[in-house]
Image (cartoon, grey):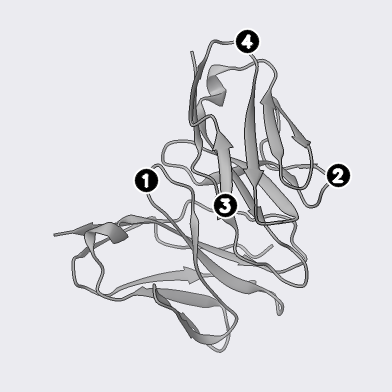
Amino acid sequence: LAKTTQPISMDSYEGQEVNITCSHNNIATNDYITWYQQFPSQGPRFIIQGYKTKVTNEVASLFIPADRKSSTLSLPRVSLSDTAVYYCLVLNSGYSTLTFGKGTMLLVSP
Amino acid sequence: NAGVTQTPKFQVLKTGQSMTLQCAQDMNHNSMYWYRQDPGMGLRLIYYSASEGTTDKGEVPNGYNVSRLNKREFSLRLESAAPSQTSVYFCASTNRGGGWTEAFFGQGTRLTVV
């Protein structure tokens, strides 16, 4: 099971781009990188998943370098409503469970 | 399409009382999970059910039991509640097969044991 490391917290202002980096040095060949978002008093929700290079959806972009030892979740032009905890997970179909670390607490200020 | 539904949303128990947290999903998922989340902490896995008819312990199973009643429902039971079990409990479901699909979480049950 690949261990992930991400910052405990980050601060930003409305309208800025936020990049949250996750390191996963022992990622396996068949591992995927997945990010979840959790608002206060709610369960986590899936944001994005990728294997390599770049993945983009309506919420975020995920950048994965060629060595796949890290990944960066990019949130364009954040708003106050993006204040949440963001979790980076590395997993493959051989795993039975979803294991969450402590995540990154993103605080967006006016 | 309700997704994952947890009941109750809030509960206060006295030490030693028992209760069952209910979870149901309507997405035909094969895997279901119970997590607890304490203030300032990430989610810790209590028990999971990889498929109907199977259950396995997670990281923090002591003091809990589970039942996978059918494909839709996965309940968590506290036989003798303790103050250390005060937490927010989340149920989740997903499909595992050739690869992971998106996991869906319920809204949580906020449990206080006094």
Q: Kindly identify the residue that appears in the image at 44 percent across and 79 percent down.
A: A57
User: Are marks 2 and 4 in one subunit?
Assistant: yes
The amino acid sitting under disc 1 is: Pro
> Of label 3 and label 4, which has the lower sequence position?
3
Disc 3, SS: loop
Q: Are dots 4 and 1 in contact, CB under 8 Å?
A: no
The image quarter in which residue A86 lies: bottom left
User: Are marks 3 and 1 in one subunit?
Assistant: no
Measure the C-alpha gap from mark 2 to mark 4.
Answer: 29 Å
Which quarter of the rendering shows the N terminus of chain B?
bottom right
Q: Are dots 2 and 4 in contact, CB under 8 Å?
A: no
From the image, tell me which residue sits under label 1.
A40
Left-right relation of A103 to B103: left
Q: Which mark is residue B16?
A: 4
> Of label 2 and label 4, which has the lower sequence position?
4
Measure the C-alpha gap from mark 3 to mark 1.
Answer: 19 Å
Label 1: how many Cα within 10 Å (few below 14, some 14–19, many 20+): few
The amino acid sitting under disc 4 is: Gly
Q: Are dots 3 and 2 in contact, CB under 8 Å?
A: no
Label 3: how many Cα within 10 Å (few below 14, some 14–19, many 20+): some
- Judge depth for marks 3 and 2 and give the one in front: 3
The amino acid sitting under disc 2 is: Gly
Disc 1, SS: loop
- Judge depth for marks 3 and 1 and give the one in front: 3
Label 4: how many Cα within 10 Å (few below 14, some 14–19, many 20+): some
From the image, tell me which residue sits under label 2.
B53
Disc 4, SS: loop
The image quarter in which residue A84 lies: bottom left
- Figure check: A83 above or below B88: below
From the image, tell me which residue sits under label 3.
B3
